[in-house]
Amino acid sequence: MPATPQPAISRYPVPRMEELPEDIRARILAVQEKSGFVPNVFLALAHRPEEFRAFFAYHDALMEKESGITKAEREMIVVATSGANNCQYCVVAHGAILRVRAKNPLIADQVAVNYKKADISARQRAMLDFALKVALDARNVADEDFAPLRAQGFTEEDIWDIAAIASFFALSNRMANFVDMRPNDEFYLLGRLPREKSK
């Protein structure tokens, strides 16, 4: 019986690894070495190398720095806003990263479906309230929206980070939906089960 063909990961052409510019190929191979697979977003966005570089430079500037928002909380913002934007790729992929960074196999599903009922802190709920307003109703963001964040100890720079992450992933959500980006199968189980302890 012939093998079932793998579904396409994008409705646009996906370049072969050997066709990619050296810097992009090196980045993808580094991700593959670290995670054990290549997330499809890297392959799909490599269709346009200049935009790939700009996208991941901004992604790293927002998601990898140290600040008053933990890396797990950053992923929470991505998952909550991506759920609201109906982006399957980002919910699945960043849900996996959230589970790993939070060391919590339940949190991503809770946040993606309804963060108001998730097992999160009041601080995180205020953060997501603001992130969702930026993602879905930015024209109505007003001075009074900052008060609950300040009351929870967020600095002005933290508030910028929350808004920037919500805004950046609104772009990512729309591009992923536009190209019909398929989440890697590996993401679905990542962080759901405890890793086996080495003997």
Image (cartoon, grey):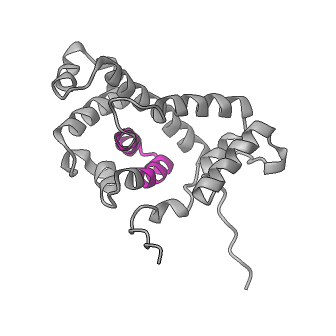
Residue 93 drawn in magenta: yes
Residue 136 drawn in magenta: no
- In the rendered view, tell whether residue 132 sits above or below residue 191: above
Q: In the image, is 198 to the left or to the right of 149?
A: right
Chief secondary structure of the magenta portion: helix
**Residue at image point 47% right, 30% down:** 62
**Residue at image point 64% right, 45% down:** 42
Q: Quadrant of the N terminus?
A: bottom right
Q: In the image, is 132 to the left or to the right of 172?
A: left
Where does residue 183 sit, x and y in percent of width and height?
A: 54, 55
The magenta segment: 72-97
Where does residue 25 sit, x and y in percent of width and height?
A: 75, 44
- Of residues 24 and 171, the one nearer the viewer is 24
Which corner quadrant of the image does residue 100 belong to? Answer: bottom left
Which corner quadrant of the image does residue 156 belong to? Answer: top left
Where does residue 58 sit, x and y in percent of width and height?
A: 55, 28
Q: Residue furthest bottom?
A: 1
**Residue at image point 63% right, 49% down:** 31
Q: Residue furthest front?
A: 199
- Of residues 116 and 158, the one nearer the viewer is 158
